[in-house]
Image (spheres, rainbow, N blue to C red):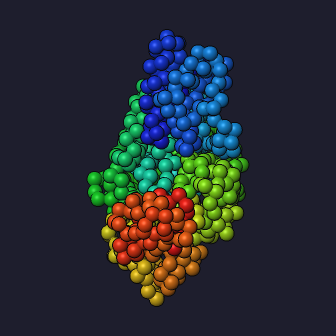
Amino acid sequence: MKVVVGQGSCGIATGAKKTAGRFEQLIREKNLDIKVDITGCVGTCYLEPIVDIYSDDGSQTRYVKVKPEDVEHIVESHLVNGIVCEGQAISEEDRQFVEKQQRVVLRNCGVINPEDINEYISAEGYKAIEKVLQTMSPDDVIEEIKISGLRGRGGAGFPTWFKWKAAKSSPGKEKYLVCNADEGDPGAFMDRSVLEGDPHSLIEGMIIGGYAMGANEGVIYCRAEYPLAIKRLEIAMGQAREKGFLGKNILGSGFDFDIRIKAGAGAFVCGEETALIASLEGERGMPRLKPPFPAAKGYWQKPTNINNVETFANVPWIIYNGGAAFGSLGTEQSKGTKVFALAGKIKKGGLVEVPMGLTLRDVIFGIGGGIKNDKQFKAVQMGGPSGGCIPASLIDTPVTYEDINKTGAIVGSGGMIVMDEDTCMVDMARYFLNFTRDESCGKCNYCRIGTKRMLEILERITSGEGKDGDIELLEELAVKIKDGSLCGLGQTAPNPVLTTIKYFRNEYEDHIYHKRCTAKSCKALLTYDITDACRGCTLCAKKCPVGAITGTAKNVHVIDHEKCIKCGKCMESCKFNAIEKK
């Protein structure tokens, strides 16, 4: 019997280490011969901390939201007496969250111990690199990736085989392979989960990529805000070297390849290839003109290939199972599976991996369980700050690169931020533009100054000071920023604004012409009033921090709008639903 506690960042944040410690304490006190192990995030982040108990016959029981105070009952009932604690076990509905998925990238996350290479090997790990070194030429590998139809999972969706072939074809003996693990989109945590839960899949994918294009050195550029990911990568790399999968003469093949980690400072612009390369070289992360492309002149002006974590993590599965197996998933143009991070106003937040081609409805409602508190679905932001808002009317859009692009958004790295009826779309555009303004490297005038001017307009609109012509000015600035910016950050920064204007223009007009926030979200445009339903309990007056509410007991109270700071404390405290927000 074995106890496995999920210890990805999400699990640790909810107290998984304390839960694991309590299991260890009680197992030791009761002198039970049971091991307490760790694993990564299985994707059901909304159920953390998660504990899996494996019986000697291999059967698994999953317990969810396990706090330290719950452990004693589970130990006594399940570990000692063999009786499942039904009240704490995962429900059938929540079990479907994982069972409805088709997991390639996340195949080992939440299943194996990421700090034990033997568990990865027992899950067919490093079989792909053995196959490559024993039976395949570099051209064979690239052809297999071509057959699979794998496209870059970092945002642009560029064919992976083409980038690999370009780097292989570039002259020169010294070549580099770089993994972009600088996951910077708000609400995105796909790569982090792989790094923390299955680091060997990335390492194996990079070894195969290095062999295919003739590189002997790989670099993982990982954001410093991912300390657990870096720690587990370092452990995995050390174990891979000990087993002969990394370093000199890998598996006796004569092929040399090793990997090192570069911790980045978390600059969003370093998601762009040439900015990332500049940072690797010790320079400020700023993009360079292309061409030449990194495949010809990249890191230290040598041929370089850059893919993200999810792209590389697909490679071992593709090589081991065959490109045609991966290509049979998804659609004709968007093949394979894709990992998405569900965040925002969704019931079941976490990671899902599904074949490309499912609709947004399938993902958000079929797997994610729909909207919190059963409120009305309003929109989903895809592609992060580089993407756009897709309205409820397009919820049956298939999740493919082509179909999502038609909406004005992009698949991007896979973030899905779900919004309900209480979300102000103008304020959402302001939020993302504020992010890109802060993250602009400042090299391009249009990006540096243009995003600032757009943000100023959006701030005026959400504060009730919008004026006629603001919408048109935003559209004009957006076009110029897209056309005048050097890299993808500036070229895509206006997308959240353009898509919200396209689908929610009425909200912009309400803010500007009627000084009203449709979603009742923008504080500057709100007013609170007490209705005749007031029973004069005086609780709201006691809770008001600025004394804006007056009235006597058992009589209807009044709010002084001049004093009111619109904090909402009165509405939260009222037991009679007598306070109205307008």
**Residue 113 vs residue 398: left or right?**
left
The quadrant where residue 390 appears: bottom right
Q: Looking at the image, is 327 positioned above or below residue 431?
A: above
Quadrant into which the N terminus falls: top right
Q: Which residue occupies the extreme top position in the image?
A: 31
> Along the line of sight, which residue is nearer the eye, 157 or 207?
157
Q: Nearer the viewer, residue 385 or 514?
A: 514
Looking at the image, residue 194 lies above or below residue 363: above
The residue furthest bottom is 468
Let me know if residue 386 appears in the view.
no
Drawn side of residue 467 relative to residue 448, left or right: right
Q: Residue at x 60, y 38 (%)?
A: 107
User: Residue 466 location in percent, x, y?
Assistant: 43, 82
Q: Is residue 284 visible?
A: yes
Residue shown at the point (35%, 66%) measured from the top left: 547
Q: Position of residue 490 (x, y in %)?
A: 42, 70
Residue 65 figure quarter: top right
Numbered circles on residues, count? 0
Residue at 69 percent across and 52 percent down: it is 366
Residue depicted at x 52% and y 66%: 534
Viewer-side residue, 168 vs 351: 351
Image position, residue 73 (x, y; %): 55, 23
Q: Position of residue 225 (x, y in %)?
A: 37, 47
